[in-house]
Image: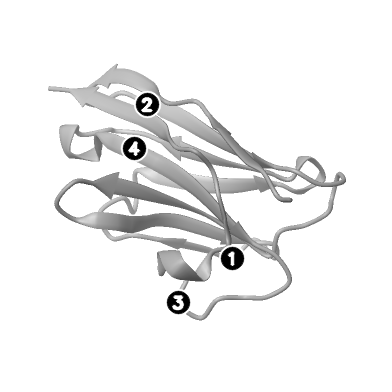
Amino acid sequence: QVYLTESGGGSVQTGGSLRLSCTGSGRPGDMYSMMAWFRQAPQNGREGVAMIADDGTTTYADSVKGRFTISLDKPRNTDHLQMDNLKPEDSTSYYCAAVRGRSLTHPFVPRLYPHWGQGTQVTVHS
């Protein structure tokens, strides 16, 4: 059984920053080939935000480029999502996702990820 544990959500003012973290279960260094963050909006479904592969390759949604940075701590099976210059439209629940043993051609398709965290809430006040 694989568990993903998220942390770091909260409430900030417009322009503020938050750092989300996602830690995967398993032995230290028991790598996930790709780890990603998605966010949920009631009307828009679940959209991809950022992805990092085990070789360090990253992908970002256009809406967060230049504001969000994803990084990887391999020995701890953890990724971090640094979110700067937050906007009210960034407010929603954020979910960590991960896959082992393969690479995804389309990293922002939710159904391709078998492992998910429970979600963490981000609220940005105007």
Which mark is on residue 46? none
- Percent from the top left, x then y, of residue 53? 62, 63
Q: Which is nearer the N-term, disc 4 or disc 3?
A: 4
Q: Which is nearer the N-term, disc 1 or disc 3?
A: 1
The span from disc 2 to disc 4 (Cα, nearest Å) is 16 Å
Q: Secondary structure at mark 4?
A: strand
Residue identifier under label 1: 57
The amino acid sitting under disc 3 is His
Residue identifier under label 2: 17
**Side of 19 relative to 12 (left or right):** right
The amino acid sitting under disc 1 is Thr
Circles 1, 4 touching at the beta carbon (< 8 Å) = no
Circles 2, 4 touching at the beta carbon (< 8 Å) = no
The amino acid sitting under disc 4 is Ser
Q: Secondary structure at mark 2?
A: loop
Judge the density around disc 3: few (<14), some (14-19), many (≥20) Cα neighbours within 10 Å.
few
